[in-house]
Image (tube, rainbow, N blue to C red):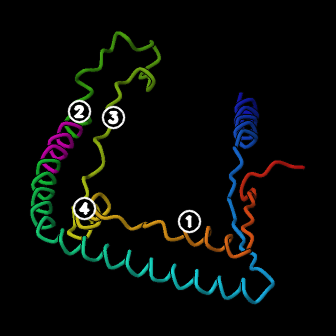
């Protein structure tokens, strides 16, 4: 019986390993043009990209600073919610501990086989959910910035278009990085 379980566990492990899906990553390579005029054009593209990224970062910082008054209010709300969640967790934990202590009272002996206690027929008491995590101002600020401020201004697609317009090449390659099929 024990050997059968080991064989079954090994077969299940092999089956799961065989079912792992491959993971791919897309890589982009930019090949500059060979002529001097093309390289000068690409230098202008670099300048435009840097200006675009600087302007985007400035807008993001302005947006983040404008959210500062909301951070404190949302943080206080998160603290109140955490207090409620913690009270609910405490009540659930007490109930769980009580069930574990006095669970034997709910156990019906006539369901047991004649040779004694059967753990498969014993009642199961699921543990409470994990302890709620304490909110932080930084986490609240990050969530507000994520929902209200835009950090991607589309500078890279514009740069790629400019690069190709100057005579450069953009080569995209998809490569398997994990659980690759055997070729």
- For the residues labelled 2 and 4, say whether their Cβ atoms are less than 8 Å apart: no
- Which residue was labeled with disc 3? 126
- For the residues marked 2 and 3, what is the alpha-carbon distance in whole angstroms? 10 Å
Q: Nearer the viewer, residue 159 or 175?
A: 159
The magenta-colored residue range is: 86-96
**Mark in the foreground, 1 or 3:** 1
**Mark in the foreground, 1 or 4:** 1
Q: Is residue 165 left or right of residue 105?
A: right
- Residue under the image location 18 percent in, 36 percent down: 95
| Sequence-wise first label, 2 or 1 | 2
Mark seen at residue 99: 2
- For the residues marked 3 and 4, what is the alpha-carbon distance in whole angstroms? 35 Å
**Mark in the foreground, 3 or 4:** 4
Mark seen at residue 157: 1
Q: Secondary structure at mark 4?
A: helix
- Which residue was labeled with disc 4? 144
- For the residues marked 2 and 1, what is the alpha-carbon distance in whole angstroms? 60 Å
Q: Indicate the position of residue 62 as horizontal and vertical percent values.
A: 25, 76
Q: Is residue 40 left or right of residue 57?
A: right
- In which image quadrant can residue 104 be found? top left
Q: Is residue 167 left or right of residue 141?
A: right
| Sequence-wise first label, 3 or 4 | 3
Which SS type dominates the magenta stretch?
helix
Asked whether residue 91 is drawn in magenta, I would say: yes
Q: Does residue 91 sit above or below 166 in this rendering? A: above
- Residue under the image location 75 percent in, 90 percent down: 36
- In which image quadrant can residue 162 be found? bottom right
| Sequence-wise first label, 2 or 3 | 2
Q: Secondary structure at mark 1?
A: helix
Q: Indicate the position of residue 149 as horizontal and vertical percent values.
A: 30, 64
Q: Indicate the position of residue 74 as horizontal and vertical percent values.
A: 14, 60
């Amino acid at each position: 019986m024990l050997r059968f379980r080991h064989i079954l566990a090994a077969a299940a492990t092999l089956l799961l390993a065989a079912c792992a899906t491959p993971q791919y990553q897309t890589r982009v390579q930019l090949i500059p043009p060979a002529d001097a005029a093309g390289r000068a054009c690409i230098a202008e593209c670099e300048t435009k990209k840097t200006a675009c990224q600087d302007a985007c970062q400035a807008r993001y910082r302005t947006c983040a600073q404008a959210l500062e008054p909301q951070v404190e209010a949302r943080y206080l709300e998160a603290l109140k919610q955490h207090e409620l969640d913690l009270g609910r967790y405490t009540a659930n934990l007490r109930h769980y501990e009580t069930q574990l202590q006095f669970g034997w009272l709910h156990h019906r002996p006539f369901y047991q086989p004649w040779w004694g206690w059967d753990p498969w027929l014993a009642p199961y008491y699921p543990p409470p959910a994990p302890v709620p995590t304490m909110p932080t101002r930084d986490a609240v600020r990050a969530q507000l910035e994520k929902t209200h401020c835009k950090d991607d201004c589309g500078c890279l697609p514009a740069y790629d278009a400019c690069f190709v317009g100057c005579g450069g090449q953009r080569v995209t390659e998809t490569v398997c990085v994990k659980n690759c099929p055997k070729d």
